């Protein structure tokens, strides 16, 4: 999908434990720092759909597993209408860069709470939030969360 970047992550291990580098300012796709936050979801919970007009998101699942789904909503994109589905988390550590106007959401998989870290390019503006929500069953998005299949 145009503008989406998926960076495979790997653990650096030694006798004391593990370290996982997620996002660096020398990554070629780094724009700027806005803030860092964690969103959680209980098993089976779906948090979808939303998008931003200005903000680029950078998702990494820290604990548990999640299905992250992207829908290209951009009129001028050569991948307009495309759906991408990623399974990310403890068994598949990824950083997913989500550009503005790419509609996205996630579902917690498995039996434990999912912890999703986001490092957006912009800080949250409480007076004028750059967040636009769509219903879970929006007919413009050809995806069915319940089955995890395209509609």
Image (tube, rainbow, N blue to C red):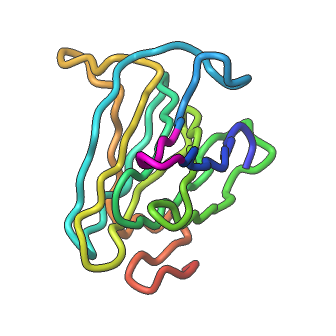
Depicted 55 relative to depicted 13: above or below: above
Q: Nearer the viewer, residue 104 or 97?
A: 97
Q: Nearer the viewer, residue 139 or 146?
A: 146
**Looking at the image, which residue sits at the far bottom?**
147
From the top left corner, tell me how far across and down residue 27 is, in percent: 68, 24
- Above or below 111: residue 12: above
- Residue 37 in percent (x, y) is at 29, 33
Q: Quadrant of the C terminus?
A: bottom right
Q: Let me know if residue 67 is in the magenta part.
A: no
* Residue 43 appears left or right of 75: left
Q: Residue furthest right?
A: 78
**Residue occupying the point 35% across, 38% down:** 132
Residue 19 among those drawn in magenta: yes
Q: Residue at x 47, y 51 (%)?
A: 104
Q: Which secondary structure dominates the residues rendered in magenta? A: strand
Indicate whether 123 appears above or below 88.
Answer: above
Residue at 68% over, 59% down: 82
Asked where in the image residue 45 lies, by quadrant, the reply is bottom left
Residue that appears at 73% across and 50% down: 1
* Residue 89 drawn above or below residue 17: below
Can you give x and y, in whole percent of width and height, for residue 96 in the image? 57, 45
Q: Quadrant of residue 95?
A: top right
| Residue range corresponding to the magenta coloring | 14-20
């Amino acid at each position: 999908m145009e503008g989406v970047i998926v960076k495979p992550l790997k653990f650096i291990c030694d006798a004391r434990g593990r370290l996982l580098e997620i996002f660096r300012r020398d990554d070629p796709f780094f724009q700027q720092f806005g803030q860092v936050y964690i969103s959680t979801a209980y098993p089976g919970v779906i948090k979808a759909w939303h998008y931003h007009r200005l903000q680029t998101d950078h998702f990494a699942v820290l604990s548990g597993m999640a299905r992250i789904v992207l829908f290209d909503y951009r009129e001028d994109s050569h991948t307009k209408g495309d759906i991408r589905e990623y399974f990310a988390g403890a068994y598949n550590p990824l950083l997913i860069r989500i550009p503005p106007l790419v509609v996205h959401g996630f579902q917690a998989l498995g039996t434990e709470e999912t912890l999703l870290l986001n490092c957006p390019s912009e800080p949250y503006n409480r007076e004028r939030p750059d967040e636009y929500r769509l219903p879970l069953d929006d007919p413009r998005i050809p995806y069915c969360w319940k089955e995890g299949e395209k509609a």
